Amino acid sequence: MEYFEQVPQLCLRPFVDKLWYCGATHFANRTLTLPLLHHELVFNFSDYFGIFRNGGRDIALENLSSWISGIQTMPTVSESKGRHEMMGVLFKPHGLKAFSHYPAVEFEDNFVDAALVFDVSFKSLLDRLQETTKPKVKMLLIQNYLLTQLKSESLPTYVDESIRLFQGTGTARVSVKETCQHISVSNKTLIQSYQKYVGVTPIKYLQIQSVNQALASLAKNPQQAFTELAHHLHYSDQPHFIHSFKAFTGLTPTQYANYVVSNKVDKTSPNFISCEG
């Protein structure tokens, strides 16, 4: 298998975290994916690739050549078979809106055919990606296309500032109310801006962020006490932490920790659980 990640071109860095490529002559895999705080543009030229909900019972997509993955608030299962070639663009929390006319909230819990999001020139990009055999050239084609799609509308500075405050590592959790006071906007304004640029409400953003922090911590130390972890993440108590964790992942912290102990989770990618074996 060939896998690599790439830092985006300088002009794209305010909006894009990274690009990635994965290819193999044969690949059979089934993975449980837990919610991330990113939108993603994915290209798929594999023999078979599908995404499922409800533990793999309901089809979300099958064999699309490209799609936008919105912020998910529930787990999904992905399955790949045969020859495998996929690549993608992982956007910053507010990054997708810089390339799309659609409010980011329209992508929440959705997988949208990318051809419906971008203009008619997108088909030409798909054709060139399939014709090109060199992965690094594919990465360049994708970035050059994104540069042509950048919109003139700028992100409100208070949205960027609120995200930085939410992502801070202070001794106490920053609330939405405190953040609104700090950046001098109303709660209603911040909610509307998050729906437009980020894709979820500020409260849901914080909830998913806390769950992601818990996943990262448990992936490194699955034996830790949940009471201490809940306190560290500023939950009011352990039951509140367990309830929130299960609401977004479909798992209890104990179940997730058992996956880690069973080597089903790579600590560098805590949102992905191997369903093989």
Image (spheres, helix red, strand yellow):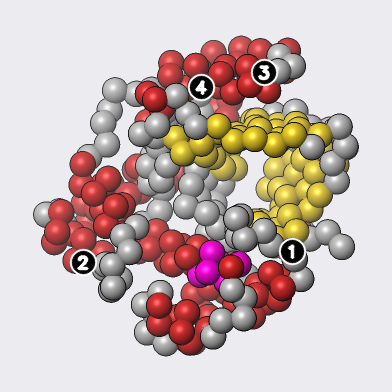
**Amino acid found under the numbered disc labelled 4:** Gln
Q: Secondary structure at mark 4?
A: helix
Task: Choose between 82 and 119: the one closer to the eye.
Answer: 82
Task: Choose between 50 and 270: the one closer to the eye.
Answer: 270
Is 223 left, or right, of 77 in this rendering? left
**Location of residue 27 with respect to 32 vertically, above or below:** above
Q: Magenta-highlighted stretch: main secondary structure?
A: helix
According to the picture, the residue beneath numbered tag 4 turns out to be 143
Query: Which stretch is magenta?
Result: 214-219
Q: CA distance from mark 4 to mark 1?
A: 33 Å
In the rendered image, residue 97, in percent from the top left (x then y), is placed at: 39, 35
According to the picture, the residue beneath numbered tag 2 turns out to be 177
According to the picture, the residue beneath numbered tag 3 turns out to be 129
Q: Nearer the viewer, mark 4 or mark 1?
A: 1
Residue 52 can be seen in this image: yes
Is 156 left, or right, of 233 in this rendering? left
In the rendered image, residue 236, in percent from the top left (x then y), is placed at: 37, 84
Count of residue discs: 4
Q: Residues within 10 Å of mark 3 (few under 14, many from 20)?
A: many
Q: Are marks 1 and 3 in contact (CB under 8 Å)?
A: no
Instruction: Tell me which residue sits at (49%, 74%) in the image.
Output: 244
Q: Residues within 10 Å of mark 1 (few under 14, many from 20)?
A: many
According to the picture, the residue beneath numbered tag 1 turns out to be 264
Q: Are marks 2 and 4 in contact (CB under 8 Å)?
A: no
**Location of residue 10 with respect to 5 vertically, above or below:** above
**Amino acid found under the numbered disc labelled 3:** Leu
Q: Nearer the viewer, mark 2 or mark 4?
A: 4
Q: CA distance from mark 1 to mark 2?
A: 38 Å
